[in-house]
Image (cartoon, helix red, strand yellow):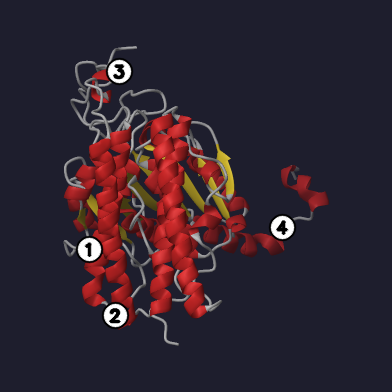
Amino acid sequence: MPTSVAALAAYQSKDFKSDLKPIWCPGCGDFGVVQAIYRALAAIGRAPHDIAFVSGIGCSSRIPGYTTAYGFNSVHGRALPIAQGIKLANPDLLVLVASGDGDGFSIGGGHVPHAVRRNIDITYIVMDNQIYGLTKGQLSPTSPKGLKTVTSEYGSLEEPVNPLMYMLAYGAGFVGQGTPADMAGLADVIEQATRYPGFSFVNVQSPCVTFGEDDDQVKDHRANMKSLASLGHDPTDRLAAMGLAQGYGTDLHTGIFYKNPNPPPTFDAQMRVRQAELAPKALPRERILDMFVQR
Amino acid sequence: MTKTRSIDFSKLGLRDALDLATIIEEEAKERYQELADQMELHHNAAAAHFFRFMHDVEVIHERKLFERRTALFGKEPRTVDRGMIFDIEAPDYDSVRATMTPRQALHTALAAEVKAFEFFEASLPSVTDADVRELFTELRDEELEHQGLVQKQITALAPDDAITTEDMGDDPVAQ
C-alpha cells in the first residue's frame, strides 16, 4: 500500500522526555522549547545514551533534568567549558548546551568567543528571556533599555547585548533563532544546528511570563515573527545575516541567519589528526618522565 | 506556521488518516495532563481539576479513534508518528498562568478546539481520498460541537471575582 508519509523515525520525542515534571511557571516559554528539543533529537535519530546535555544555572538550565540523555546541570556560566571537555573526552557524543541570556552572556560571557573560535562540535541553545527569572527579575545582558526591574526601578540605562551579532562577529559557523510560538520551526532550527559539523548557536526568544516585559509575548511572537526563509534570506551570506541580526530587539526573525557552506575542521577533528600524527613519537608510559629530564 | 511535517494530504489514505487523528488526540491528552500537573504544582486546584477532566475527554476520543482504526485495519503497522504533528489540538503552553481562573482554563480549552477545527478545515481542500474527506469532515464538525460544549460551560460559570490576577502584581521594588 503506498504511504503518504515518510518512514517512521527510530526514536520518538517521548523517548527523550524524562520522568521529572518541569517546575517552570505555567505559561513559560521554556515548555515549548523543551518540546522542540525532544522533536529535534527524535529527528536526528541518535539514542539517548549517545547524547549529553550540559547547562549552567537558571530556569533554562533545568532542561538536562527534563531530558533523557546524559545530563550535567553545572555551575553558573560554566556550561560551555564543561561541554567542550565532554566533547573532547568522548567525541562520539552529541553534545548540547542549554543556557539563558544571563548565564550565557553575562556570567559565562567570557567563554563564548573562545568556544566559537575553538569550533568544537557542540550546539549552544540559549533561552533568551531578557531577564534573570530564577532570581526574581533582575536586569540581564539582553534586557531592553528602559526595562523596569527590581534592579532598575526607574528603567534600565544600558543598551542590551545582541546575541546574534555577538555570535556572527565571533565567527560562529551556524547561527539561528526561534521562538516557542513556532515549535515546529524551532525544532527544525535546533535539528539543523545539531547536524552542523562545528559550533552552532540557537537563540530562542523564550518569554518569562512572571518577570518579563509583557504577559503576552508569545502571542506577539505569533503575530509578528517573520521567517528568514520567507524573506528570501540566503543563509550562506554572513554579511546579510549581520544586517538582519541588527534587528534584534525590534524584529523577530526566525530560522537560520548563517550557515557556513564550507565548515572548517572542528577542534575535535584536528585534535584526532594531531594525536594520530604524534602517536609514533609518543613515549611509553613508563618513560613519560623522560620528557622533563634535562640532558 | 507549519503544523505537520512529511505528510502529503493529497495522498493520505484512511488508515494513516485515522492514525493521524489518533495522535492528534494523544498530543492533546498529554498536554492537558501536563497543564493539570502544572496547576497542581502551583496549588490551583480548580484549573487542575478542569484540565484533568479535559485529559479524560481526550482519552475517550483517542480510544474511539483507535478502536475504529483497529476494526478496519487490524494490526497493520502505523506509519505516522508524533514527530509529524505540532500542537494541532493541544492547548497552547502560553495560554495558562499559575493563578488562572476556571473561566480562563475553559477559554484555553476553547482556543484548542478552535485550533483543531481550523486544522481540519485547512487540510480538507488538499485531501483527495473520499473516505479521508468524510473522516476529516466528521472530525471538523465534532470540533465545532466541542466548542459549543465548552462555550456552554463558560456561559454557565459564575462571573469571575472583580479582583483579577493583574491586581496582584506589584511594581518592581529595589532589593
Label 1 chain ID:
A
**Tag nearer the camera, 2 or 3:** 2
On residue A176, the disc is none
Of callouts 1 and 4, which one flags the residue occurring earlier in the amino acid sequence? Answer: 1
Instruction: Confirm or deny contact between disc 1 and disc 4 (CB under 8 A).
Output: no
Residue B9, by quadrant, is: bottom left
Label 3 chain ID:
A
Q: What is the C-alpha distance between the residues marked 1 and 4?
A: 51 Å
Q: Nearer the viewer, residue B24 or A212?
A: B24
Q: Which residue is mark 3?
A: A150
Q: Which residue is mark 4?
A: A282
Q: Are marks 3 and 4 on the same chain?
A: yes
Report the amino acid beneath label 2: Ser
Q: Residues within 10 Å of mark 3 (few under 14, many from 20)?
A: some
Report the amino acid beneath label 1: Ala
| Image point (25%, 54%), residue name | B114
